[in-house]
Image (cartoon, helix red, strand yellow):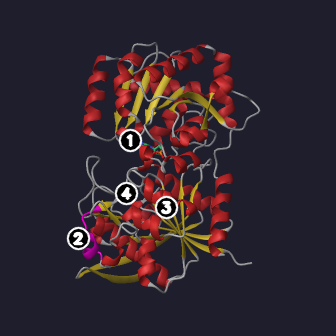
Amino acid sequence: MSKTSLLFVASEVYPFAKTGGLADVAHSLPRALSGEHEVSVVMPLYKCIERERFGIVALEENFNLFMGGIDYPVELYGCTYEGIDYRFIYSPLLCDREFLYGSSECGYEDNDIRFGIFSYAVVELLRRHPYAIVHLNDWQSALIPLLIKQEGTLIAKTLYTIHNLAYQGNFDSSALYKLGISMEYFTMDGVEFHGMVSFMKAGIAYCDCVTTVSPTYAKEILKPEFGCGLDGFLAHHRSKLVGILNGIDTEHFSSVNDQVLVQSYSDISGKALNKKDFLKQSGLIGIKKPLFVFIGRFVSQKGLDLLIEALPKIASLDCNIAFLGEGEARYCEALNAIAKECSNIHLTFGYDESLSRRMYAAADFLLMPSVFEPCGLNQLIAMSYGAIPVVHLVGGLTDTVRNIEKYDSEKRNGFGIVFTKQTGRSFINAINRAMELYRDKRSYSEIANHNMKCDFSWKESAKHYLSLYKKLEG
Ligand code: ADP
C-alpha cells in the first residue's frame, strides 16, 4: 500500500529557526510520523537560517503572488535533513528580518502580509505537488484552510494544531483587502473578531480537524478563563477538537547522548560533574545546595509575576537559582534588581540551546509556575535529564507531572512538586517541599531516576495523529 503524503507547515522548525516549543514539535513530530507517511515540512527561509550548513538549495520553482494589487516574488528552496524533505519559502518581505515575528515587546506591523505570503505560497506548493493531508500549526499558517476553500479545486484535507491560543494573529480588517480575501469570510462564523481579522479563527472554522497540545488544555480553552475570547467559538467547533499530548525528541534531548554535556549519564549519579561545571561557569557556590533553574520566555504566561514576587524569599533559602531566557524588559529589569542583591541568583539573558541543555543536566529542580500552559516541553526535558519539575498544575502540566505525594514506582508517568493555586504562598510552599525532598536523598534520587526512565517520546501521540489523518482520508 502506498504511503499517504503529508505536508507539515510551521513558521519555525528546529534546528533551522526556533523561538519556542513549536520549533521542537515541528522537528520531532514529522520524524516520528515519517515511517508511516511521506512527510515534507515547509517553513519560511528566514535570514537567520544557515543555508550552507544545511545544504539548502534553490529548487528553481519561482513564482509571483498577486495580492491587494501588489506582486510579491517567491522562491522555493529545499534540503533533506535527518531523512526528512524540507521545503523553504523565500520572499524578501517575509524573510529578510532581524526576528521571526518581531521583538519580544511587539510583533511586526506587516505580519498579516508576511504570513499571508507564506500561506499563499504553501497553497501554490499544493497546486504543484498535491498532498493528501496538510497539517497546519498556530496562527502563522492558520489562513491556509480558508485559502484552500477559496481556491476551490484542491483536495487536501487539513488538520490545524493550536500550540498556544493566546497568540491569535489578529489584524486590522484592511488585511482582507491586502490579502485578496473575499469579504464574505468577514463574519462572526468566519474570521471576524471584534472588528479585526483573526487568522486563528480561519484555522478553526475552515479546517477539517483541530487539535491542541494536551487533553487538559483542550478542555480548558472551552472556558472563558483560558479561552482568550474564543471559548464560545471553539465550543461551537468542539466536535472536531481533540487534545493530543506533545512528546519530545528523545534522541536529541538525551542525557546519554548529549554532546554538549561535560559528562553524559543514564542516572542522576552522573549529574554531579555537570552541576559542578555549571556552578563554576556561573559563579554560584555550593554543590550540596539544591539548584533551581528557570528556562523560558520572560512573559506573563510563564508565571514571571509570581516568580519575581517569590524570588527574594526563595533566594533566602539555602539554594541556588539560575535563569536562562529572554522577553519583556519589565521582567528583565525586575530580575536584575533582585539578582544584584542575592549572590545565589544567576541570570543569563538570551537564547542559547546548548546552555539550556547544560542547565537541565545541572539542575536539581526546574521551576515552571506558568499561569497557563498548553503543553510545555521544559518539564518533559527536565524530567528526562533528571531534574524534578516544580509546576503550577495547569494545562499540559496536569497531564505530564503527577504529585510526588502520590509517587508510585509502578506508574509510567513523571512525578514532580505541584501546586494548585497561582499564589505566592502556594508557590513558596512548593519550594519548601522541594527543599525537604532534596534533604531526603533517597526519595529524591528514586523519583528523579524514575522520571529519567519514563517515555516522553512521540511514540503514543504520533499514533493519535496517524489515526486522525486516516479518518480525514476517509
Ligand atoms: P513555549 O511556550 O515557549 O513554546 P515550551 O515549553 O513549549 O514553551 O517550549 C520551550 C522550548 O524552548 C524548550 O525546548 C526550551 O528548552 C526552549 N527554550 C526556551 N527558552 C530558551 C532559551 N532562552 N534558550 C534556550 N532554549 C530555550
Given the image, on which type of amino acid does mark 3 rest?
His
- Horizontal relation, residue 322 to residue 376: left or right: left
How many other residues sit within 10 Å of disc 3, few (<14), some (14-19) or many (≥20)?
Answer: some
Q: Name the residue under label 3.
A: 236
Q: How many labels were placed on the picture?
A: 4
The nearer-to-camera label among 2 and 1 is 2
Q: Position of residue 394 (x, y in %)?
A: 51, 38
State which mark lies toward you, 1 or 3.
Answer: 3
Indicate which disc residue 297 carries. 1
Q: Where is residue 113 in the image (x, y as percent from the top left)?
A: 28, 69
The residues colored magenta run 171-179
Q: Which amino acid does label 4 sit on?
A: Gln
Looking at the rendered structure, the secondary structure element under dot 3 is: helix
**C-alpha gap between disc 4 and disc 3:** 18 Å
Q: Do the residues labelled 1 and 3 touch (CB within 8 Å)?
A: no
Could you say whether the residue bearing mark 2 is in a helix, strand or loop? loop
| Position of residue 204 in the picture relative to residue 383 (left or right) | left
Which picture quadrant has residue 345? top left
